[in-house]
Amino acid sequence: MAIKEAFTAYDHANFDELAHHFLNKNIPDFWKTWNQRFSKNMASRTTIDGHSDDGKIAQVFADKFRSVYYDSAINNVCHAGIC
C-alpha cells in the first residue's frame, strides 16, 4: 500500500508541475519536466525498504507475497468439501 501511495503522490506532483509550466506558457521548463518524467534512465537505482540490491529487493517482494498468500490446496478441511 505504501508503494502505491508513494507512486500516486509522485505522479500527482509531476502532473501538477507539468500543468503549471504549460498553463504559464513556460515551454522550456515544460519540456524539461516532461523529459525528466517520461525519459527513463535505466541505469537509475531503485530502493525498496532501504534495499537497492536486486536480490534483496526480490526477497522483500517474496516475503510480502508470502505474508498475504494462503494456499487453500494444503488445507485438509477444504479437501473434505467443507469450504
Image (cartoon, helix red, strand yellow):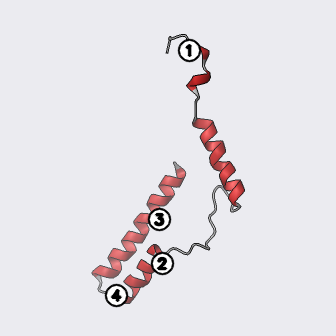
Q: What amino acid type should be assigned to the residue bearing mark 4?
A: Ile
Q: On screen, 51 above or below 15?
A: above
Residue 6 % position (x, y): 51, 58
**Lower sequence index among marks 3 and 4:** 3
The amino acid type found where label 3 is placed reads Tyr
Q: Residue at x 40, y 65 (%)?
A: 12
Residue at the image position 47 percent from the left and 65 percent from the top: 10
Q: Position of residue 76 (x, y in %)?
A: 61, 15
Say whether disc 1 or disc 3 marks the residue closer to the N-terminus: 3
- Camera-side residue of 1 and 67: 67
Labels 4 and 2: the sequence-earlier one: 4
Residue behind mark 2: 36
Disc 4 is placed on an element classified as helix
Q: Which residue is mark 4?
A: 27
Rendering coords of residue 9 (x, y %) = 45, 61
Q: Residues within 10 Å of mark 2 (few under 14, many from 20)?
A: few
Task: Give the residue pinned by disc 1.
Answer: 79
Of discs 1 and 3, which sits in the foreground?
A: 1
Report the amino acid beneath label 2.
Gln
User: Which residue in the structure is indicated by mark 3?
Assistant: 10
